[in-house]
Amino acid sequence: MNREPTISASNDIILSLKILAREKEVVRRKLAVTAAKLAATAEKLAVTAREKEIVRRKLAATAKEKESVRRKLVVVAEKLKKSYETLEQKVLERTKDLETSCAKEAAILLSIGDELLVTDEKGNIIIINKRAEKLLGVQNKDVVGKLFSDAMLLVDEKGNPIPAERHPARMALMGSATTAAGPIYYDMRKDKTRFPMAIMATPVILDGKVIGTIKIFRDITDEREIDKAKTEFVSLASHQLRTPLSAVNWYSEMLLAGDAGELNEKQRKYLDEVYRSNQRMVELVNALLDVSSLELGTFAIEPKSTDICKLAQDVIKEQRPQITAKKLSFSFLCKKRAVHIHVDPKHLRMVVQNILSNAVKYTPEGGKIVLSVALADKKSILLKISDTGYGIPKYQQGKIFTKLFRADNVRDKDTDGTGLGLYIVKSVVENSGGKVWFRSPVEGGTKGTVFYVKLPLDGVKKSSNK
Amino acid sequence: MIIAFEAGTLRYAEESAMTTQKTILIVEDEKILRAAIADILTLKNFLSIRTRNGKEGVEVALSKHPDLILLDLIMPTMDGMTAFKKIREDAWGKSVPIIILTNLSATKEQPTGDMATNASTYYLIKSDWKLHAIVKKIEEILGSQDKS
């Protein structure tokens, strides 16, 4: 009976059951689809998981690498730190060294025994040493940064200010090499004392550019005093040496002239020796004085327009007695009536006189002398003095202008002569911007000498007697 | 004014003042040279007055008006250059011929300027000049003066 009710279920129920069964089937099918989807998803997830695992593994590897890099970095950092410390130490040491060497250089610069002043490229003072401060009577702080020309008032001998463009510092800035100027006078602004200064200004060049100037200068009052003393010595020496010579000259001259009665032949001969020796002494003293004047620079050069032909004629006139005595044939050629040259006539005279008297002295009796004056070119004059004399031996030609040198051949023949003449000639000619040279023997012959003197027509600049 | 001349010379000069002899004033501190010049001048028929320094020289020059002056440069009491200037300042002294007879080499301190402008100044170096040549020069100067 239990099953009866079941069997006896109404058609409605059956129908409902059938519907239910169908719905179940739908659900089952849906579930199956879902299960399949889930399976697919699970598979995808598995793939992703695998990929993730790979990534994780990779990440783990990277982490390991990173760790090793980090460790390495730590090592490097430590090393760096150490080397940095060493470097710092080194820098400290080097800085100290540099400071020491800088200080040394500054000390060297500032301790220079002369007065020193350094400017920048604009002429502003950047360094002044103690000596310069003392000499100029200024303080470092008062002049540093100021223009050189404002800090120092330079004047000439007469007290006129020297224009800025002629300041040695300015000239050095213009790039001209070392400029020596002196004496320049400096007016101390405080007490208005003036003293002569020698200034040497040099451009400071870095990488081909002028970055400033260095000026070394000093008070040359003492030097000037010495110069003056030298000049005085030369003139006094000339006076003292010549006075006894004049006495011997004049008295023997009067005796020889018979002014104190007639002399016998032997007396005359002896006295003549006295007189001639004294004459040599006079010549020697004169030559020595000329030489010392030239060497001490006490020769005042006073150039003026000089008629060289007339001057030569005067010298010839002086030599005439010796020329006549030796029966020399003498010609004088002056191309132009008057050739004027701007020289000190005293000096030119010394030149002509020395060369001509040599020609007369060293040409044997009956010889020939020619003196010619002509323009060498537009700017210079050529003096030519040729003789048919003994000539200058080849082996001694290099020494002929040397002080006190006399060639062997003339020393054999004539003991007279100072060995100073040609030395004086060379000094004077070269001081005048000229040139002197010679040829011996004369071309085409075996004897004789030709001396050439070339002098610029515009001649020499005036120099003071210093 | 008392001037210590060498004995006899001034008197001699004054006694002969009436003659046509020319009077030469010697200003020279070296006795030996002064004597030599005086001797040759006497021999050549000149009158001479000897003085020993610039001061004496100026005094005698301005009071005695000699025809020509031989003037040394380096001398005690007053040097020749100072004496030269003092003589030239005087109206008479302006034109008197003066031969500077010295052993001092000519330098720029010497009267080169005056020599260029004043025709009656001469500069001779003693040791370079014979006494006879100096006398000749004196005669030449005085001769040309007489002519003019």
Image (cartoon, rainbow, N blue to C red):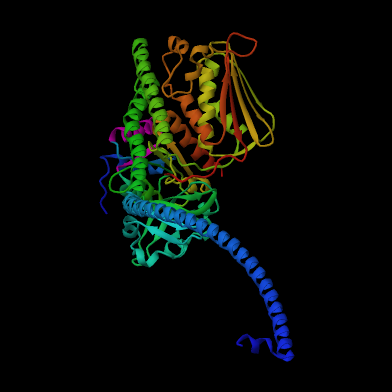
x and y percentages locating residue B120 in the rendered image: 49, 45
User: In the displayed structure, would residue A284 be above or below residue B38?
Assistant: above
Residue beneath the point at 54% across and 10% down = A365
- In this view, the residue in front, A200 or A311, is A200
- Outermost front residue: A1
Q: Which residues are magenta?
A: B31-52
Residue beneath the point at 42% across and 60% down = A126
User: In the displayed structure, would residue A220 be above or below residue A31?
Assistant: above
Going by the image, does A124 lie left or right of B27?
A: right
User: In the displayed structure, would residue A435 be above or below residue A216?
Assistant: above
Q: Is residue A58 visible?
A: yes
Going by the image, does B12 lie left or right of A437?
A: left
- In this view, the residue in front, A36 or A372, is A36
x and y percentages locating residue B90 in the rendered image: 42, 55
> Is residue B49 shown in magenta?
yes
Q: Number of numbered discs present?
A: 0
x and y percentages locating residue A177 in the rendered image: 51, 46
x and y percentages locating residue A19 in the rendered image: 73, 85
